[in-house]
Amino acid sequence: MYVTDSQIDEEAPPVVDGWVRSVSTNDNNDGFFGSVPMIGVSVDQTVLRAWWNIALYHVLDPSSTYPPGASLLRAGVVYDEEGLLPSGTPTPITNADADWLAITTMNPHIAILARETTNAWVTLWGFPIDLSIKSQRKNETAAARVLYVAWEMALEDEVMGFTMTGWNCSVDAYMRTP
């Protein structure tokens, strides 16, 4: 069957592609884990490509030992339903089977004894550049979805008073909207 250009134009819905950026700083601080909703994905919208970054820091003052002992920090971008509370958002260690667009293990890139008089330790985690997400998601559900940045710390054993002092993250997504 032969189709003319005018028939294609009449049948094809308009499509708009564009970048969406979201940045959050210390949105919540739940100690061993955290999450923040970053970019909403409306019904029939598609996340074509994305980049993300996260930076976390922890100050332990005073402490005579390197904090926080043997630990594992995982972070990622999860695609889930809209309106999840931080305590209900999937986290990368506890919910590794969630719909993750990106997930990675992070090691501290700096751990320094910042003040010798009171043994204040500063530990920093983060990436020097944004990480690429090549996973695509089309929202074919009846409700909005969201890209959440989430992180979780697994400690060898409990460390009294350990909470992440602060963190920030960003997500850039190339979205297709019909």
Image (cartoon, rainbow, N blue to C red):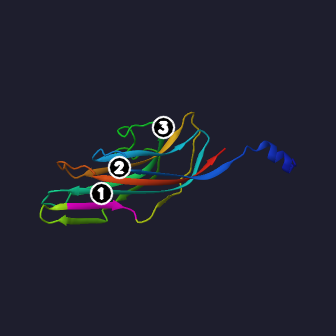
Q: Tell me which amino acid carries mark 1.
A: Tyr
Percent x, y of residue 3: 86, 48
Q: Is residue 128 magenta?
A: no
Q: Earlier in the sequence, mark 2 or mark 3?
A: 2
Q: Quadrant of the C terminus?
A: top right
> Which residue is labeled 3 in the image?
82
Residues at marks 2 and 3, CA–CA distance in whole angstroms: 20 Å
Which is in the foreground here, disc 1 or disc 2?
A: 2
Q: Nearer the viewer, residue 114 or 85?
A: 114
> Which residue is labeled 1 in the image?
57
Q: Earlier in the sequence, mark 1 or mark 3?
A: 1
Dominant secondary structure of the magenta stretch?
A: strand
Under circle 1, the secondary element is strand
Residues drawn in magenta: 121-127
Residues at marks 1 and 3, CA–CA distance in whole angstroms: 28 Å
Which is in the foreground here, disc 1 or disc 3?
A: 1
Q: Residue at x 84, y 45 (%)?
A: 7
Q: Quadrant of residue 58?
A: bottom left
Under circle 2, the secondary element is loop
Q: Which mark is residue 26?
A: 2
Percent x, y of residue 61: 17, 56
Q: Tell me which amino acid carries mark 2.
A: Asn
Mark 1 Cα within 10 Å, few/some/many (few <14, many 20+)? some
> With 143 as the anchor, is 59 left or right in this view?
left
Q: Tell me which amino acid carries mark 3.
A: Glu
Under circle 3, the secondary element is loop
Percent x, y of residue 166: 31, 52
Q: Is residue 126 magenta?
A: yes
